[in-house]
Amino acid sequence: MPGYMSLVFDCANCGRPDVANPILVLSIPARREGDHYVPDPNGPREPICRNCALQALERIRSDDPTLTSVSPELRSPDYFDRAYGTPAAEIDL
Ligand SMILES: [Zn+2]
């Protein structure tokens, strides 16, 4: 896909490396401390990996009352595929 950019990063939640769409990737407020991230409500938003994003999306879609601002984008059914990519098998078709 021309112009498609991938963001390569270490997950701010679990530290696992992952690749995602830099605009759509799910992020959490965190700051870097040594070689890992710690949650920080005042920190910059740092991207999280697909496993952590799946867990976060489950909370978002179950209407967790502790979540205050959720982008409508995150509730769309194809958000995850667009943010974290489509399996290679499907791209080749
Ligand atoms: Zn993670």
Image (tube, rainbow, N blue to C red):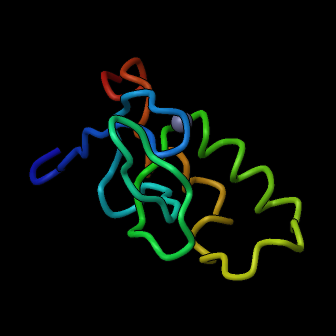
Q: In which quarter of the image is residue 60?
A: bottom right
Ligand 1 resides in the quarter of the picture at top right
Q: In this view, does 5 lie above or below 93?
A: below
Q: In this view, does 36 lie above or below 73?
A: above
**82 sits to left or right of 14:** left
**58 sits to left or right of 15:** right
**75 sits to left or right of 8:** right
Counting the numbered discs, the total is 0
Q: In this view, does 1 lie above or below 64?
A: above
Closer-to-camera residue (61/10): 10
Q: Farthest top residue?
A: 89
Q: In which quarter of the image is residue 64?
A: bottom right
Counting from the top left corner in percent of width and height, residue 38 is at: 51, 50
Q: Quadrant of residue 90?
A: top left
| Residue drawn at x 36%, y 51% as measured from the top left | 32
| Residue drawn at x 40%, y 18% as measured from the top left | 89
Closer-to-camera residue (6/12): 12
Quadrant where the N terminus lies?
top left
Counting from the top left corner in percent of width and height, residue 81 is at: 50, 44
Counting from the top left corner in percent of width and height, residue 34 is at: 33, 40
| Residue drawn at x 42%, y 66% as measured from the top left | 45
Q: Farthest left residue?
A: 2
Quadrant where the C terminus lies?
top left
Q: Farthest bottom residue?
A: 69
Closer-to-camera residue (66/36): 36
Closer-to-camera residue (82/48): 48
Q: In this view, does 42 lie above or below 38?
A: below
| Residue drawn at x 50%, y 65% as measured from the top left | 29
